[in-house]
Image (tube, rainbow, N blue to C red):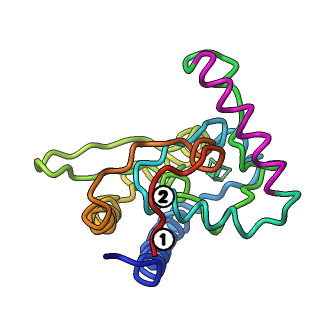
Amino acid sequence: MISWDELIPRLRKLYAEMDAAYQSAAGEASFSCDGCDGVTCCTVDVTLHTFAEMAYLRRGFNTLDMAGQLEVLGRCEEMISAKIGDPDGEQYRGLVCVLNLDGLCRLYEYRPMICRLAGIPHMFVRPDGTSLESGGCHKFEREFRSDRPDLMIDRTFFYREMAEIEIGIVRAQGKRTATRTVSETLGLEDPDNLLP
Ligand code: SF4
């Protein structure tokens, strides 16, 4: 049975490796988020695919004081209602992540993998051996791509390691975790058993 004592250091190590890869690539391209208000990247209710990241984000949420938690929960309620109303509608799609406050992530240290690696072009090799590539954010493509046309982060290791961590949890719990967005992760009661 995987425990918090095992999960947290492993996840933190993986996140640190992602951050290092990101900073290295950003340094190579002299790329930074300066000039962006953060809202552009955070205009989305990010979907989480693993119990590990959901549990870690919830752990971060628990570090907020009561006023902070209530404010985030209010935003979660609004986000979840909008999604229920019309998941493809402008009202839902146009909302900013419940954790983005004045352009900054409120749980920056606990933010999920997708947020840590966003902005710089990337590729990854799928289990069947084929690879996928994707471009960077608008700012990268507009201002940095021409100088560094080949720069990209290889996410393969990060995805595999995250999957390994998750497999340990799935084995321990005997079931997979349904995907949930950030607002659902924080705003809905957690039906999964918490780790010991
Ligand atoms: S979790 Fe943080 S970095 Fe990720 S979309 Fe939300 S506010 Fe932005």
Give neighbour class at mark 2: few <14, some 14-19, many 20+ (Cα, 10 Å): some
Query: Is residue 87 highlighted in magenta?
Result: no
Give neighbour class at mark 1: few <14, some 14-19, many 20+ (Cα, 10 Å): many
Total numbered labels: 2
Residue 71 placement (x, y as % from top left): 83, 48
Viewer-side residue, 29 vs 34: 34
Q: Disc 2 marks which residue? A: 113
Give the extent of the magenta segment: 69-86
Label at residue 101: none
Residue drawn at x 43%, y 41% as measured from the top left: 135
Residue drawn at x 33%, y 65% as measured from the top left: 169
In the picture, residue 157 is in which quadrant?
bottom left
Left/right placement of residue 180 relative to residue 78 reads: left
Viewer-side residue, 126 vs 188: 188
Residue 120 placement (x, y as % from top left): 49, 52
Residue drawn at x 84%, y 57% as measured from the top left: 68
Residue 12 placement (x, y as % from top left): 49, 76
Viewer-side residue, 133 vs 172: 172
Chief SS of the magenta region: helix
Residue kind at label 2, given as amino acid type? Met
Tell me how far mark 1 sits from mark 2, CA to CA. 7 Å
Residue at disc 2, secondary structure: helix
Quick check: marks 1 and 2 in contact, CB under 8 Å? yes
Left/right placement of residue 121 relative to residue 89 reads: left
Label at residue 15: 1
Residue drawn at x 48%, y 71% as measured from the top left: 15
Residue kind at label 1, given as amino acid type? Tyr
Label 2 CB less than 8 angstroms from ligand 1? no
Label 1 CB less than 8 angstroms from ligand 1? no
Residue 151 placement (x, y as % from top left): 40, 56
Query: Is residue 74 highlighted in magenta?
Result: yes
